[in-house]
Image (tube, rainbow, N blue to C red):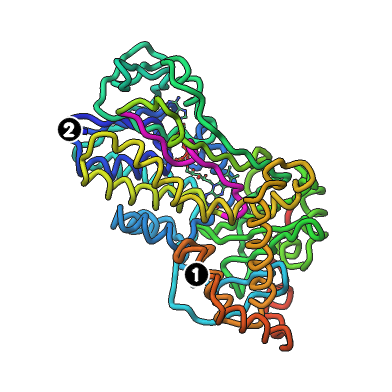
Amino acid sequence: MNRRTHALVIGSGAAGCLAARVLSDSFAQVTIVERDPAPSDERTLRKGIPQAAHVHNVLLQGNRQLEHFFPNLFGKEFDRAASPLIEVSQDQRMYGPFGWNPVYPTGWHFRGYSRHLLDRTLSAQTAALQNVRILYSHEVSELVADNGRVTGVRTKQGEVLNADLVVETSGRSSRLETWLSAIGVSEIPTRRVPTTDGYATRTFRWRGAPLPYKQFAILRKPPERPRGAYLLEIEGGRWIVTLVGAQGDFPPHDEAGFLAFAQSLATADVADFITQAEPEGGIHLYRKMENVCRFADRVPNWPAGLIVLGDAVCTFNPVYGQGITTATVSAEYLQRLLKTNREGWERQFHRGLVQILAGPWLLSVREDLIIFAGTSALYKSWAALRHRFRVTLLRHLQQAAPKDRAIHLRLYQVQNLMRPLSSLYSPMLFARALWAKFRLPPPAPLASRLNTVPSGSKKAA
Ligand SMILES: Cc1cc2nc3c(=O)[nH]c(=O)nc-3n(C[C@H](O)[C@H](O)[C@H](O)COP(=O)(O)OP(=O)(O)OC[C@H]3O[C@@H](n4cnc5c(N)ncnc54)[C@H](O)[C@@H]3O)c2cc1C
């Protein structure tokens, strides 16, 4: 890639903003083309990111990387919005697949926020970069190509926008395959692992005494325990409650059903919260949660001048909260590759991306593959046997985590993409896991907040 005049990014979601930030160091001008109008100051949800209604728990690594690329990201606007600072263990109560997670000081913090606040702040800070502009209310309808090279895009409004590099980050609903086929490029080999998970989410205001946590989770454990929940304090004294059901056991849309689902969970905390907090707005559902990975590196006639990242290349089951973090890690990799300035770097980029996504992909599909074991062809292959072996090892560690901080911490780091998956395969950890089998589980942390709720706090309507 020799000419670096103009880069064009499709979509201003998290991946689009991160890509634009990185490209702004190498290209004279960067344009983001976004189908939606500019995000408003209110809490109105953007049509292009319907998932923003649901809990977005960005992993620690993702929060760090976001701050690395946008040093002022979690500054003034988050303070003004009163977004809470959360210690990752002490401010959290988590009922995992094998009991309560241990609570201990880590010194690691992150902000609790809605996806809406992140989206608004991220796009404002991206647009404020000197050589970046966002063209709102413009929808890309096709790629423009010449002689095996993508040279720009055509918008639904009929404009042709030329670019030396086009970066596709239009998310889960990407139409990249259709666009590529129209310019004669072969199909992208794609792996899909369906999920049976579904979300129902509502936001609440808490006016009672301070709770002993800022984040609460009951993880589902399919197939025995398909139901789970997340409760996260976000900006403005609000809390977001997402109920999750696996194996088609979806949380419902109506108020009574929402509460009944919460009451059926492994602990009473979420139901207690719902009955004593004040609801804001309606209940939102989300059910298209399948894992999809596209292997752009395997397309023999992939055009020069085009790369794809973010959800457009790989979408994960959202229950593991990996989407934004993998976008940040991919952006960091793009930054490194842009420095090499070699012809044919697009293929190298996609090849490297496959390596980067392999760990998060395994973490995301491990349970879905087991649920679909009977039907998935992938599960019958040799690779699948290896998968089952790795999943079994992981389960052993998860089982020991409530009783052993060192194992819990390592799992936490891997799940938060701070360490590679391979760091779990340690004889020392497995020896500890074995030893933990003979230890008693720790007492439950102060989690049930019934005692802490003052009388007179508001009830859900
Ligand atoms: C229910 C749910 C919950 C989730 N929870 C978490 C979580 O807890 N933590 C986490 O890290 N991730 C989570 N994710 C994933 C996360 O939302 C995505 O990984 C993240 O948004 C990165 O996406 P992106 O930028 O690739 O796409 P998006 O954020 O979806 O952005 C795509 C953008 O492209 C625009 N666009 C689409 N088509 C066009 C077009 N033709 N022309 C121009 N613009 C276009 C859209 O309007 C949109 O702005 C969740 C996802 C879902 C579905």
Q: CA distance from mark 1 to mark 2?
A: 39 Å
In the figure, residue 297 lies in which quadrant? Answer: top left
Residue 423, labelled with which disc? 1
User: Residue drawn 58% across and 60% down?
Assistant: 232
Q: Residues within 10 Å of mark 1 (few under 14, many from 20)?
A: few
Q: Earlier in the sequence, mark 1 or mark 2?
A: 2
Q: Is residue 282 above or below residue 388?
A: above
Q: Which residue is mark 2?
A: 2
Q: From which residue to which does the magenta span run?
A: 305-320
Residue 58, labelled with which disc? none
Q: Secondary structure at mark 2?
A: loop
Note whether residue 285 is visible.
no
- In the image, 268: left or right of 429? right
State the image coordinates of residue 220 (x, y, percent, origin top left). 72, 59
| The residue carrying mark 1 has its beta carbon less than 8 Å from ligand 1 | no
State the image coordinates of residue 75 (x, y, percent, origin top left). 33, 59
User: Residue drawn 59% across and 58% down?
Assistant: 239
Q: Residues within 10 Å of mark 2 (few under 14, many from 20)?
A: few
